[in-house]
Each structure stands twice: as structure tokens, then as C-alpha cells.
Image: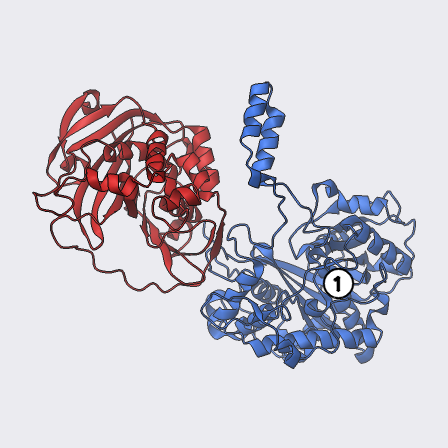
Chain colours: A blue, B red
């Protein structure tokens, strides 16, 4: 069984929007039909999140369940959902204590939603929020449910601390022991070092490299420079600050514990200021290290939720429609022995998704690429512009395409807002849906948006949204 | 060689073990059980703590090995055999856990990990090196290289016959080197695993000129992994391998033997590297490691493994471990499909 990373059945045509004119109107939403045989759309009604806060700060004592409950209540308040039985709620956390085994259901029970609202937990590392959206959108399109809430939460501050493997094994053996002798033997295996608690790391289980070290290898491979990374980071802060200034986030963010804006945001951030920071990753690679605390995302706490619905449900509840979730594609890369970079799956998911949809990069009004690191975004763009990558990795005739950078992360992204892992998907989907609504209302034409989110384990999820 | 194992002492030629070239006939010594090495290493450690190890070891050297004349030194012309050595499930699992090897289920049950088979045979190999007529000091020997041919899957629970001998004592630019050759046979006499471990005895002179050219300069590749090795790594590996050499156990016991501190077992690194390679189930393979600078504990090793393909397209993987700060290599090696 060999599986090549390129599963693209047909090369994506390099077409301009003009060449493809008319395709939008004719395109019918792919996907299964409901009982009447008519395909139905799943739309984003709105979103809500709490401001993201730097770890061990404002939310240090808030747990995952507190934060997820808060965003559900905020969403319910915004759209009048108190006492409403929602079709299903799906959410998750990447750093999750075993006691939170039913985190989403418990959060629903603690919220103002009807307690008869079913819920389940999702986990796909940093793509958790995207996968929650994808699953629920499909249920809506299938006609199984009419409304849904997709969410995610993470706390780097309230992270579960576990006992060492040695202590765990000894305790389990002690538990199984029947005689005093067996019990003493189990305890005798303990060593002082076993008593040290273990904090969750950001290291990949199969490689032992931290995510930053993995990205540093990819950064060096694609020759992504320091200035370009710092410029992208500064733009993220600039764009997020401007979006807050114009009130864009007023109906997407609800204050929490005295925080009203993402407190990682540095509105006065510039490339020059960022240039003063010392590199923290890639220091032993031979190449010049370029990744700093400024062009890498900070550990943050936060939660987000997105209200999804069928068009009928939204109309019946007199709720607005921001955008349709058209299609989602997950990809994974073989990073374990270095065949591909850990965070490069988005570079594969997007071309596959666009091929299926018959779209090219030029067809998007807005593009959201999750800024795990500035270099992740830049390496993805570089790969798409690279002929060899297009031919050998994507199975295309040449390069996949060049992105117009003025459409990228226009309302800020993870470098400025922060990245509470599972909460990022919900932040991006709600932000992009609102951007598309604004654009469609301004121009009177449909607006289309693209999302790419990379994740641990070599995962990546891409999505196409469209506002009419 | 069928039936020969039944004899208490027998003779066979080297041609039967690994082809022509070392034609000396050797006596076969059948041991009743796998010897324990812990006692030997403990005694050596006590001696070392008294500061007398080096002197004692030197004094024990026959004059001809100290380089003050005499004839050509000789390794004992014997091989040690232990029959009915079982691949114990819980010991196998414990070994795999320490080196991070996956437990793989094959048609005949759990497939024994090649690194554990080395550990299983190791005490028998050491019993040759601790014979009174063995001319070199065991605790001062350095593991230079290891080569294994894993010829057929071995199931956990299987009984094997272990045969070990020392051969090819030859000059090295830093002393003398020799090979310890081990073979594992199924009960039907079919060899399933052979290993050749090359050791250096520093400062020992034997006649002749060193044959090995100096190693090419090591240029670290892009890492694919990072090993953070805690201080207890050597103790953990000793517990599952039986190799209680004090240089691996603690700072003081290692320093008593002239090391800068406790160092990881070479075969820990080699086994951990092998565990990273996705050899398709049931595939015979050759597994090699060359050891350079020892890994001081606790420590961090930058690691790289590169494959030439996946699944049925796989024929080999090459790996290396090095110090991420200095770029100095700790080990290099690889795994390659045998035959077909």
C-alpha cells in the first residue's frame, strides 16, 4: 500500500476569473440531497468568541469548560437561542483533561441552550474547529439536522498535568496487585524522578521535535527570510487592529473576564520592531535562524463558536446568512521521515479542494491561511508558486498559482490574535463569513473565500465559503 | 550442522558460520543457560572504584599484547552455545518500550524486535569475552560498529539456539579491534539472525597496519527528529538488555572508568534508530550502525532518517544521530532490504 501525497485526479486549470465567468452561476452545490431530492445548503449564521488571552494571564484560572460555556452563552444571547434546542453541538479542545471527556455536552448543559441539545467532542489538533464545522455542515446538508454550533476551546494555562510514565505504571500495577508482596514490588519500582509531574509539550510524538523546530526545517528548505516573516507578522497585527478599530469584531467577540480585545495584539507592531527579537527556533540547522517569538504564535487561551444552519432554519428564525460553507478537504503529509514539512498539509488540501470545485486562487476575494508561524504561510505560498512542487507533489502541469497578498488574512490572524488551538477554526470561519457578507453586500456580487489551517500530525484542512 | 548442538564439545569450521576466510577449527562449549552479566560488571565496578582497574587490566594483559614482543596474539578458538533460549514476551515488551519499538503482530504471533534479539544473545557473546583465556580487558572495550542480518521473522515465545564467538583480532589506529559474531538458529537449525559487533581495545597493539581509512567528514542533514535522553536512559536500557557496564549507569561509575560521564549504550541508539524505520512486515533486512562520539547522559541527540520509498517500494533507509550543538556525529547507519 503506497499512497502518494498527490491524489489530485485532474490538474487544476490555471484560469483567470474571466475565463471562468459564468461557472459560479451554473455550479450546483455538490453533495447529497435531502428527501425531496434537492441539494440544500449549510450556511454560517454568525459567530462568537471570547477575546484570546496570552497564556498564564487573564484567563489563567478559567478552564476549558468555563470558556466554552461562555462562548455558547454569548452566541445564544446574540441570536436569541436561549432555551432553543439546537440540532447538534460539536466542539473540542486539543489540551484536554480526562475529566472533560464529555466537554461539549457538559458545556451545553451549563449553557442557556435547551438541555435536550445533543453534543459531541471533536479533536483534530489545530484543525479541530474546522473539522467540527465540516462534520456539522455535512449533517445539515444531509438533512439530519437543521441547526448546529461548531466550536473549540483551549487553555495553555489550565493545561492538564500528568504523572510520569513510571509513576503511572507503578500505580496501575499497585492497583492490580493482590498480595502485600506484589504491592511492595510495584512500589519498589518507583524512582525519585518518577514523582516529577509532566506538562504537555508541543513536541510531535513521533519525532520529538517541537512544532517550531519542524517549521524551522521547512523554513530553511524553502529559504523563507526573516524580513518576509516579520513583515507578515506586522501585517497581522496591523490588520487585526484596524478591524477592531472599524468595529468589525463588535458582533464576533464578547468580552470575558475583563478582556475586550485579544491581548496579544500589538497595534504599533512594525517589521523594524520585530527585527530586534532573537531567533528561538532553528538554531542548530546550519541555516541562519529566522523564527522569533514575534513571528511565531504565542500560547494563548480562548474559545470560539459558529452558528450553522440550513437556509430554511435561518429564515424561520429571522436570522441573517453570512455565507455558505461550500466544501471542505482534509489532507495529511508524511512528515515523519522528512518527506514533507509537518505544517505543509494545507499546501496539498487547497489544490485538491480547488480542483474538485473547479476554482483557482484568483477566484477568491479573501484567503485565510492560519498563521501558526509566519513562515508556515510563506512556505505554503512559496510551494504554490514553485513549478517543481506543482509537478512533482501536486501532479499539476506547473506551479499551482500565486496568491494576491492583499487578499490574505485581511482582518488579522493568529500571529496577532493568538492561537488557542481548537478555537482557531471557529475564529477564522466566522471572520471570513462576515468579510464575505460585507463584500457581497458592497458589490452586489457573490464573494468567495478560502481557508487553510495546518495542524499537528501533518494534518491540514481547507474550506471554501461563499456569500451571495 | 544439525545434531552438533547435542554434543557437549564439538568442532566446526568457520566456513559453517559465515563463509570461508577464517578457517580455524574451534571447540564448541555448550553452556547450560544464558549467563548473568550483572555480577561481573558489579565486580568490575568495585575494582574500578578502587582506582586499580586500569593497572589491573594492564597487568593481566599477556606481554605480547602490551606490544613488548612475543608472537601473534590469539582469541580463544571456541564458540559458546546456549540452546533453548526463549524470546520472553514480557522482557521483549519491556525492551521495545525502552527503545520505542512498536509491537508488531505477524502471522506467527508478535514479531520479535531485532534489537531485543541482540540483547538476548548479548550475555552469551560476553561469556566468550570473559573467558580466562580471552586476552583483552572487557570493560575498556569500545563498541565501534554493529551489523545484523535479520533473515526471517522470529516470533515472541520461540526457542532459539544462541552461538557466539570472537574472531578477527586486528590492528586499529587507536589499538586493536575484533569482531564478536553471534548466530541465532531456530530449533530446526535454520539460522534466523546473525550479528557482528566490532569492538576496539584501546591502546592494545597487535601486529600489522590498520586497514580502515579515516571516516569521511560528517555533514549533518536536516533533522527529522530529536531525542531528549534523560539521565536514567542507560539504567533503563541496562535493565532490559542485561548490559550493566558501569559506563552507562551513573556519572560516578562512568568516571571511574575514565568516561566524562554516563553514556548511552550504542545498541540503545541503534535499536531506537531501527525502531523508527518502517520495515515492511516479514521482510528480511540488514541493519547497521557505526558508533562515533558517545552520547553523554542526560543529553539531546539530533536524528535523521531518510527512506528511498514506502511499503513495497522500500529498499533502504539511512539514519544518523549527532550532537545538535556541535554537529559531531554520534552514530550513522541504515536498514536495507535483504535479497529479492
Of residues B253 and A429, which is closer to you in this image? B253
Q: Is residue A459 left or right of residue B269?
A: right
Give above or below for B163 relative to A240: above
**Image quadrant containing the C terminus of chain A:** bottom right
Query: Few, some or many C-alpha atoms within 10 Å of disc 1 (few <14, some 14-19, many ≥20)?
Result: many
Give above or below for B298 relative to A17: above
Q: Residue at x 77, y 64 (%)?
A: A430
Q: Residue at x 17, y 55 (%)?
A: B211
Q: Is residue B304 visible?
A: yes
Q: Residue at x 70, y 62 (%)?
A: A419
Secondary structure beneath label 1: helix
Of residues A318 and B283, which is closer to you in this image? B283
Of residues B216 and A446, which is closer to you in this image? B216
Of residues B118 and A458, which is closer to you in this image? B118
Choose top left, top right, bottom left or bottom right for residue B107.
top left
Q: Position of residue B288 (x, y in %)?
A: 31, 48
Q: Position of residue A393 (x, y in %)?
A: 48, 65
Give above or below for B74 relative to B82: below
Q: Is residue B146 visible?
A: no
Query: Farthest top residue?
Result: A179
Q: Position of residue A141 (x, y in %)?
A: 75, 55
> Residue tagged by mark 1?
A427
Choose top left, top right, bottom left or bottom right for residue A229.
bottom right
Q: Position of residue A461 (x, y in %)?
A: 63, 60
Image mark count: 1
Could you tell me which chain the residue with mark 1 belongs to?
Answer: A
Q: Residue at x 73, y 65 (%)?
A: A428
Q: Is residue B71 left or right of residue A263?
A: left
Amino acid at each position: 500500500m503506497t499512497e502518494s501525497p498527490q491524489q489530485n485526479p485532474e490538474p487544476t486549470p490555471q484560469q483567470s476569473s474571466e475565463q471562468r465567468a459564468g461557472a459560479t452561476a451554473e455550479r450546483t452545490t455538490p453533495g447529497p440531497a435531502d428527501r425531496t431530492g434537492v441539494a440544500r445548503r449549510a450556511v454560517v449564521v454568525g459567530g462568537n468568541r471570547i477575546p484570546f488571552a496570552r497564556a498564564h494571564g487573564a484567563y489563567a484560572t478559567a478552564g476549558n469548560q468555563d470558556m466554552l460555556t461562555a462562548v455558547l452563552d454569548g452566541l445564544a444571547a446574540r441570536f436569541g437561542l436561549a432555551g432553543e434546542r439546537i440540532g447538534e453541538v460539536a466542539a473540542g479542545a486539543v489540551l484536554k483533561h480526562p475529566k472533560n471527556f464529555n466537554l461539549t455536552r457538559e458545556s451545553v448543559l451549563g449553557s442557556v441552550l435547551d438541555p435536550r441539545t445533543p453534543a459531541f467532542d471533536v479533536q483534530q489538533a489545530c484543525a479541530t474547529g474546522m473539522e467540527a464545522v465540516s462534520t456539522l455542515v455535512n449533517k445539515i446538508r444531509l438533512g439530519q439536522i437543521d441547526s448546529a454550533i461548531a466550536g473549540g476551546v483551549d487553555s495553555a494555562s489550565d493545561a492538564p498535568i500528568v504523572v510520569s510514565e513510571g509513576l503511572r505504571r507503578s500505580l496501575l500495577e499497585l492497583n492490580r496487585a493482590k498480595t502485600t508482596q506484589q504491592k511492595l514490588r510495584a512500589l519498589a519500582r518507583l524512582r525519585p524522578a518518577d514523582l516529577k509531574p509532566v506538562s504537555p509539550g508541543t513536541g510531535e510524538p513521533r519525532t520529538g521535535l517541537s512544532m517550531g523546530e519542524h517549521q524551522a526545517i521547512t523554513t530553511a528548505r524553502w529559504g523563507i527570510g526573516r524580513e518576509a516573516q516579520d513583515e507578515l507578522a506586522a501585517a497581522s497585527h496591523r490588520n487585526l487592529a484596524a478591524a477592531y478599530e472599524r468595529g468589525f469584531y463588535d458582533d464576533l467577540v464578547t468580552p470575558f473576564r475583563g478582556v475586550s480585545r485579544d491581548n496579544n495584539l500589538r497595534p504599533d507592531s512594525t517589521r523594524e520592531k520585530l527585527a530586534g527579537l532573537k531567533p528561538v527556533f532553528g538554531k542548530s540547522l546550519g541555516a541562519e535562524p529566522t523564527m522569533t517569538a514575534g513571528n511565531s504564535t504565542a500560547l494563548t487561551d480562548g474559545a470560539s463558536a459558529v452558528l450553522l444552519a440550513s437556509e430554511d432554519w435561518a429564515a424561520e428564525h429571522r436570522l441573517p446568512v453570512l455565507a455558505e460553507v461550500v466544501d471542505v478537504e482534509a489532507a495529511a503529509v508524511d512528515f515523519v521521515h522528512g518527506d514533507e514539512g509537518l505544517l505543509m498539509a494545507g499546501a496539498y488540501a487547497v489544490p485538491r479542494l480547488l480542483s474538485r470545485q473547479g476554482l483557482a486562487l484568483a477566484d477568491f476575494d479573501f484567503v485565510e491561511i492560519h498563521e501558526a508561524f509566519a513562515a508556515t504561510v510563506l512556505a505554503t505560498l512559496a510551494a504554490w508558486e514553485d513549478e517543481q512542487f506543482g509537478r512533482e507533489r501536486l501532479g499539476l502541469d506547473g506551479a499551482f498559482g500565486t496568491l494576491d497578498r492583499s487578499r490574505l488574512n485581511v482582518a488579522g490572524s493568529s500571529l496577532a490574535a493568538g492561537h488557542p488551538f481548537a478555537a482557531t477554526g471557529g475564529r477564522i470561519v466566522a471572520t471570513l463569513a462576515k468579510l464575505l457578507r460585507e463584500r457581497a453586500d458592497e458589490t452586489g456580487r457573490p464573494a468567495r473565500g478560502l481557508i487553510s489551517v495546518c495542524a499537528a500530525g501533518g494534518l491540514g484542512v481547507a474550506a471554501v465559503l461563499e456569500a451571495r | 550442522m544439525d545434531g552438533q548442538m547435542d554434543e557437549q564439545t564439538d568442532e566446526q569450521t568457520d566456513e559453517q558460520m559465515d563463509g570461508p576466510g577464517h578457517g580455524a577449527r574451534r571447540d564448541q562449549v555448550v553452556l547450560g543457560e544464558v549467563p548473568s552479566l550483572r555480577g561481573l560488571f558489579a565486580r568490575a565496578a568495585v575494582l574500578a572504584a578502587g582506582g586499580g582497574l586500569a593497572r589491573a587490566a594492564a597487568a593481566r594483559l599477556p606481554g605480547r599484547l602490551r606490544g613488548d614482543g612475543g608472537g601473534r596474539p590469539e582469541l580463544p578458538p571456541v564458540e559458546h552455545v546456549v540452546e533453548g533460549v526463549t524470546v520472553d514476551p514480557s522482557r521483549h515488551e519491556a525492551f521495545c518500550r525502552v527503545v520505542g519499538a512498536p509491537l508488531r503482530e505477524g502471522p506467527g504471533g508478535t514479531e520479535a524486535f531485532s534489537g531485543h534479539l541482540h540483547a538476548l544473545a548479548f550475555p552469551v557473546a560476553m561469556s566468550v569475552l570473559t573467558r580466562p583465556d580471552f586476552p583483552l580487558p572487557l570493560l575498556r572495550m569500545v563498541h565501534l560498529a554493529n551489523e545484523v542480518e535479520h533473515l526471517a521473522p522470529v516470533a515472541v515465545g520461540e526457542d532459539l539456539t544462541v552461538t557466539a564467538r570472537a574472531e578477527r583480532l586486528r590492528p586499529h589506529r587507536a589499538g586493536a579491534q575484533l569482531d564478536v559474531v553471534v548466530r541465532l538458529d531456530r530449533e530446526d537449525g535454520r539460522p534466523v539472525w546473525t550479528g557482528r559487533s566490532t569492538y576496539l581495545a584501546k591502546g592494545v597493539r597487535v601486529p600489522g597496519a590498520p586497514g580502515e581509512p579515516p571516516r569521511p567528514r560528517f555533514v549533518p542533514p536536516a533533522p527529522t527528529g530529536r531525542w531528549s535522553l534523560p539521565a536514567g536512559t542507560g539504567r533503563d536500557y541496562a535493565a532490559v538488555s542485561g548490559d550493566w557496564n558501569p559506563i552507562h549507569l551513573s556519572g560516578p561509575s562512568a568516571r571511574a572508568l575514565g568516561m566524562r560521564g554516563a553514556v548511552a549504550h550504542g545498541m540503545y541508539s541503534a535499536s531506537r534508530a531501527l525502531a523508527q524505520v518502517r520495515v515492511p512486515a516479514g521482510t528480511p533486512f540488514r541493519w547497521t550502525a557505526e558508533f562515533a562520539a558517545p552520547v553523554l547522559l542526560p543529553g539531546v541527540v539530533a536524528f535523521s532518517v531518510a527512506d528511498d520509498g514506502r511499503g513495497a517500494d522500500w529498499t533502504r533507509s539511512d539514519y544518523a544521530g549527532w550532537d545538535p550543538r556541535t554537529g559531531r556525529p554520534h552514530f550513522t547507519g541504515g536498514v536495507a532490504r535483504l535479497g529479492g
